[in-house]
Amino acid sequence: MNRRDFMQWAGLGAGAVMLPTIPVIGRSVSPEALLDNAIDIATKKRLADAALNAATAKGATYADIRIGRYLNQFVITREDKVQNLVNTESYGVGVRVIADGCWGFAAIADAKSEAQTAKAAEEAVAIAKANARLLKEPVQLAPVKGFGEVSWKAPITKNAFEVPVKEKVDLLLSVNDAAMKNGANYVNSVLFMVNEQKYFASTDGSYIDQDIHRIWPTFTVTTIDPKTGKFATRESLSSPMGMGYEYLQANPADSVKGITTRYNMGYDMLEDITSAAQQAKEKLNAKSVEAGKYDLVLDPSHLWLTIHESVGHPLELDRVLGYEANFAGTSFATLDKWQSKNFNYGSPEVNLFADKTQKGSLGAVGWDDEGVNTKRWDLVKDGTLVNYQAIRDQAHIIGEKESHGCCYADNWGSVQFQRMANVSLAPGKAPLSVEDMIKDVKKGIYIIGDGSFSIDQQRYNFQFGGQLFYEIKDGKIAGMLKDVSYQSNTQEFWNSCVKVCDERDYRLGGSFFDGKGQPSQSSAVSHGSSTARFNGVNVINTARKI
Amino acid sequence: MAILTREEAKKIIDKVLSYSKADEMSVALNGNRTGNIRYARNSVSTSGESTNQSLAVTAVFGKKSGTATINEFDDASLEKTVRRAEEIAKLAPENPEYVPMLGPQNYAETKSFAQSTADIDPEYRAKAAFESLDPCKKKNLTAAGYLEDSAGFTAIGNSKGLFGYNKATSVDFTITVRTADGLGSGYAIRDVNDVSKLSTKAATEVAMQKALASVSARALEPGKYTVILEPAAAVDLLGNMMRSMDARNADEGRSFLSKKGGETRLGEKLFDERVTIYSDPTNAEIPGSPFAGSGGGRFGGGGVDGRPQEKVTWIENGVVKNMTYSQFWAQKKGVKATPSPSGFIMVGGTESLADMIKNTEKGILVTRFWYIRAVDPQTLLYTGLTRDGTFYIENGKIKFPVKNFRFNESPVIMLNNLEAMGAPQRIGGNLVPPLKIRDFTFSSLSDAV
């Protein structure tokens, strides 16, 4: 499921069709079934060995198997009603092999016997051999050592699946009630929880068991002015996180106070929706922006999406090489720019890094989906492009000796491929608060929350909206604006970055549904930053009459 | 799994229903096989095939419902699934918007299944990919493409005597061809039910021609232009509008179809009078599902929807004639519960794309749009970019390729600025004519190729 579909189904998208149904990802089960014990480790190892041995026997030079159990729970409400409660489980295995120099992949649902996993392995070898005829050059894998039998668990403190459904329903209904009491006409709220139980084994000698948790509480509040027929929405300032239910047990230290409260490792949904209802009303009467050049002060709840689109995607090596040309596109950040060692991706203030280890982030795992241990590495250093995101079969192309560890498949039945790591903007080194940053801005707009987003297929030209827009005049917030979108070009934009607030303001944003590949796969990824200032960005007015 | 016949599917569904102790029960039985082949950089990258089967049971007690799913069909497993759905239903919160299940329905016959597509095997896919790759390699062009085929069936039934069955096949093919220097890019997209109507070679030749013709694009100033949108470009904006025709949103005041004072624009002339859009599941060129809601039962939805898909006119001569209704909202409003269609048909003209170009003094030909996102739901304002073949037309001829533009435009405004329409073509399961539109708003330039 991609982001747009999810927003539509959950009734969250702007003008979404609020269908009371959600397509089931996996089979529907009872909430209790989500806590059942999965297959034990010894059985998984047996199933894995059967597949790896079968692949090797059929002539594979490399094989890996992923035994996956994927659990989802959605709680979906509007106003005083529970609209939908969905619990799903999906279990199966995917086997990937190299035979005759070519990749082959086969997957099988509900495989619980060695005969089944061996059969999947044999099918994968057959597919590899059939496609080898169409291959230009054989796959080259960067070496990775076997890690033996190891495990990794997301450092959560409260498993969301253990929290009774009633408690979740009560939370959302109380949140909705607060919105209505504060002037909302409509409110839709959702709690979405994911648990990936993944076992990976390969002919390199790794047997890796991992337990990954994600959570996303979110809402949309709508207010309507019956006199004008205009409506306005304000979406949640939460972020999807690689956390358990503890994300919803906010303490004030996890938030940043200011013109509106913004959140870090803990989210106070009740506080945010109360502000949201009031702000949605305020939006109806806000001043329509005058188009022109403004200095933008971008909050991390907004900037994550700009980082995602204009840095995360163009620095994916498969896009750079052309593997995504028919769908997501290619990249302006071509190999010659990287090879030159002097391509100014951004100003000297700009340090962007990739990371698969940050605690609480959506991308954090111990090992990626091809058994590579995860790490952090630089992409843009002091403004200069220094690296890409690459996996085992790409590392040699950029002269690297090892994979970056950012290979992922969204399900046991999907083939793993290069996916975006958490890509983040490093905080500024000099002490700087948001208030001090705003003090210096003469004509600017302070943007909080993510909104509409669009970027071209090589990641040059983009346009972003937001949730809250505040006019800055002579160092002071002068009131709310509406109808704001900004347009820029990636290199120009990052070179207009003049200041980044210090690490006290560093927070994560992220996406649950980053889409890529054919058939399309979803990946969850976080992007951290502190508030940053970009000078002289082109702002357009999006108001129209129909 | 094999594609079950109507009789085989009914037998399983009847057996499931015979185990029911619930107030109402619905069953959805699905089976399909999908396969794909993907290539890029003139070489195959991934390929796979998967088969899926599932049976979803929804049990309802009062206004509480629960769904359980299984993929084994022996008697014991079926009964266990019924009991599980019933247990989940009893524990579920009450849904105040629950609508009782429908009784028997009459479903149209749709011809959405083709044996040729059901017979596709890995050899066929490899050949289809070769026929696309080979001409590109010979011309020193780089191909990236994707073919996905699917064959399957859906059967639905419930304890009130409703039963429906449909089998369908589909093939989707997309191809992007780029020049070796990366300065030209072309694209083609095809979708069919019957694979014998697909030529990956012919589609690839269109993309090749566009790639070669789009090299050395010139920059034009952003602004308002007359455009000719090929069906692949027009379909996304039109589709977004068609997905925004929900009556409840309009009644609640949060849709482009809302008006001040709680009224809607139903019955209002909102578009140029030549604009007529309808849906028809029996249309021979885009046969659709005969019933709405083919998936399993869900909490809150009352299980299988099962409403028949019928011919519906959404916009006629520029006037909004119908909106989509959930069963709950239709009941509340006392109107017919018209479901969302599976595809739409925009009535067009008879001109070919070539004729439309010939009849254009100055304009821009758009192959497709990319990364379209909503900017303002009140006005249906969208943004996005042109991609893979954008050309300047002068005095009836394509003069030169132009750099890609970002647009900010609403399909409502666009359909008021209609100049001409060509002959409709199948695109993404819809029939859409090429559209000539004046004053289409391009707001900035992109360097992307």
Image (cartoon, rainbow, N blue to C red):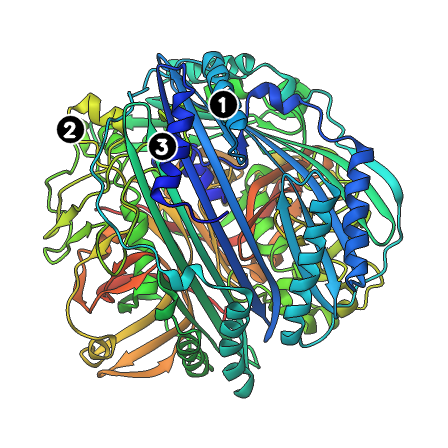
Could you give the CA–CA distance between mark 3 and mark 1, rounded to whole angstroms?
30 Å
Query: Could you tell whether A231 is left or right of A90 in the image?
Result: left
Task: Give the label, 1 or 2, closer to the camera.
Answer: 1
The residue where tag 1 is placed is B79
The residue where tag 3 is placed is A19
- What is the crowding at mark 2: few (fewer than 14 residues within 10 Å), some, or many (at least 20)? few
The amino acid marked with disc number 3 is Leu
Query: Which residue does the image show at 27% across and 68% down from the upper left?
Result: B227
Instruction: Kindly identify which chain the residue marked by label 1 belongs to.
Output: B
The residue positioned farthest toward the bottom in the image shown: B138
Instruction: Kindly identify which chain the residue marked by label 3 belongs to.
Output: A
The amino acid marked with disc number 2 is Val
Q: How many marks?
A: 3
The amino acid marked with disc number 1 is Glu
Query: Which residue does the image show at 62% across and 55% down from the upper left?
Result: A311
The residue where tag 2 is placed is B335
Q: Are marks 1 and 2 on the same chain?
A: yes
Q: SS for tag 3?
A: loop
- What is the crowding at mark 1: few (fewer than 14 residues within 10 Å), some, or many (at least 20)? some
Residue A335 visible, this orientation:
yes
B182, A473: nearer the viewer: B182
Task: Give the label, 3 or 1, closer to the camera.
Answer: 1
B426, A160: nearer the viewer: B426
A13, B66: nearer the viewer: B66
Could you give the CA–CA distance between mark 3 and mark 2, rounded to whole angstroms?
18 Å
**Image coordinates for residue B28, horizontal then vertical, percent:** 40, 34
